[in-house]
Image (spheres, rainbow, N blue to C red):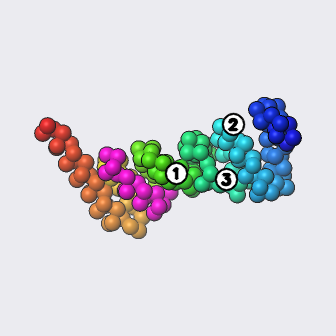
Amino acid sequence: CKVLEMNESCVSARAGLTRIYLEEVKSGRGSAEMKADLVRMLQRERAAETVAEHFEVLREGVLLESLDPTFAVDLTECLVRRRHEKDAAAVALSAALRMEATGALEEAAAMYTRAFALDYNVTAEEGMKRLTEKTGREHTTATQLLVAAGDETMSARISEAMFFMEKHVDKLIDKACE
């Protein structure tokens, strides 16, 4: 730790500390603070695959609101590959919220859609619908709502999907008439 305090770019010190923290966490001796520190170090190193690989033991150290959106996108895909869809959806939703807050609406809409596709989450659904017209994603939103229509809110989702499909068709007609 002292070496990192003196020279934060010391690769060998960072790698050694990461290895030590990971061993502690995997053995069950790592505190929540240590897990959060480890996730921050791995995020700095863009090591989303490592976070996903050890997500079960790192979960409480993954402070969703503090994840860099770009890292969160990478982590989402790594978690999906490892079949952790609910965790991936939570990470994607967190990234979408941060992206929307910073005005990156296209990216936010894509992440809301990704989160919703992984876990039919109401918050992801609301975000996806909220940004649909602003980003011109009527077709994508309608498709996602129809795919999700197999659950208990089927009729409401189908109705909303048709609304967005109508908007999409209207835009296509307007373009054709120009």
Give, as a three-letter code, the residue at label 2: Glu
Is 27 one of the magenta-colored residues?
A: no
Residue in the picture at 62% in, 51% down: 66
How many marks the image carries: the answer is 3
Mark closest to the chain's N terminus, 3 or 2: 2
Say if residue 151 shows up in the picture. yes
Circle 1 crowding by C-alpha within 10 Å: few under 14, some 14–19, many from 20:
some
Q: Mark 2 points at which residue?
A: 45
- Whole-Å distance between the Cαs marked 3 and 1? 15 Å
Where does the magenta region start and end? 119-136
Where residue 15 sits in the image (x, y, percent)?
A: 80, 35
Look at the numbered disc 2 and give the secondary structure of its residue: loop
Q: Name the residue under label 3.
A: 62
Circle 2 crowding by C-alpha within 10 Å: few under 14, some 14–19, many from 20:
few
Q: Which residue is situated farthest in the bottom direction here?
A: 152
Vertical placement of residue 174 versus 65, above or below: above
Q: Name the residue under label 1.
A: 98
- Whole-Å distance between the Cαs marked 3 and 2? 15 Å
Residue in the picture at 36% in, 64% down: 154
Is 124 one of the magenta-colored residues?
A: yes
